[in-house]
Image (cartoon, rainbow, N blue to C red):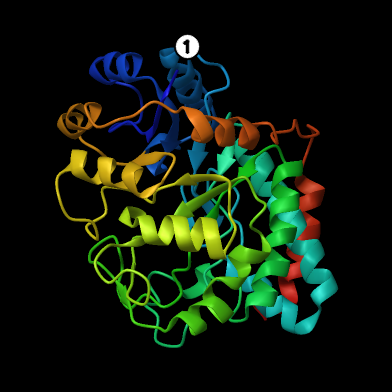
Amino acid sequence: MPTAAIFDCEGPRLSSEERAFFRDVDPWGFILFARHCESADQIRAHCDELRECVGREDAPILIDQEGGRVARMKPPVFPAHPAPAVFGELWKLDPKKTREAAELNGYLLGRLVSDCGVTVDCIPMLDVPQIDADPQVIGDRAYAKWPDIITAIAHAHIEGLKKGGALPVIKHLPGHGRSLCDSHHDLPRVGAKKRDLQSCDFEPFRSLRDEKMGMTAHIVYEAYDAERPATLSPVIVNEVIRGEIGFDGLLFTDDLKMKALGGAIPERIAGAYDAGCDVALACNFTMDEKKQSAGALRDLAGRSAERAKAAMADLQAPERGDTSEAYERLNALIKPALA
């Protein structure tokens, strides 16, 4: 059986050393970054070689293609998509057209990635931004400031994404909207009370808890666990994410290379598994770090394997064909929000 991990390659394509490593450890799937996305042909070839490497044609391949500033597949080679906040602005003008635009955008994102062999797009971001949150982390990546609006837009995005042939990942559980620093560089701490988190931050995740894949936040929620960030906290994973929110899907860690987490690579991986995360997201590891991680990896087994199987069962083949008219319609729908 595969190991409960997602890896990427250091360069634009597999090295011989990486190929041997992946054959040995057999990760469940892979993730792509901008260096792997210079052209559609490059992405397809890379996806093929990754799957061949582990001997599974259905090995999931992930990407962060949100639209706006978070896009691995970049213009001018690939079409630009609006930042999530554009849909929140459009909602103020016309909720009905917003739902149409969000579903259409989701479909086009799904087509964009699935046409290249990618099966999972790590959207939507359900974080509820607070007034003092770090704009570099949240900013226009958030749909809106209100949980019900975030939920409505995200739901439409999810429906479209699935029709486009890709699967969603709700993130960042249980909510990144109060972060005062970037977890890529430092460990955020949230001092909000339980009642505030429950009534605001958790709400979009609770509303979409039936989705099949989610991703944790590297944030300390002091009201629940003053010592450990969510990714490494059994309290947050079991009592909050699985309990209060009710999410029972496949739970990925956020990128384990981020500086919010302390300790050596094997300690981070083991800590995430011990906390209750299903899959370790091993992004941007050097070859030495990959080798260090091997001893800490665990098989994707038991309930985690069941969750993974259920998640991938939702994958559907999109209707192929030209998308130019759909892009024209999307651009016309969102134009008032850009004025």
Residue at figure coordinates x 17%, y 55% from the top left = 262
Residue 13 at least partly seen:
yes
Q: Relative to 149, is 323 above or below?
A: above
According to the image, label 1 marks what residue? 55
Left or right: 73 in relation to 99: left
Q: Amino acid at mark 1?
A: Gly
Q: Position of residue 248 (x, y in %)?
A: 58, 49
Left or right: 161 in relation to 191: right
Q: Position of residue 65 (x, y in %)?
A: 53, 50
Characterize the local packing of mark 1: few (<14), some (14-19) or many (20 or more) Cα atoms within 10 angstroms.
Answer: few
Q: Quadrant of the C terminus?
A: bottom right
Residue 217 at least partly seen:
no
Q: Quadrant of residue 317?
A: top right
Q: Position of residue 88 (x, y in %)?
A: 66, 76
Task: Describe the element under mark 1 as helix, strand or loop.
Answer: loop
Depth check: 202 or 90 in front? 202
Q: How many marks?
A: 1
Depth check: 171 or 209 in front? 209
Q: Quadrant of the N terminus?
A: top left
Residue at figure coordinates x 63%, y 57% from the top left = 209
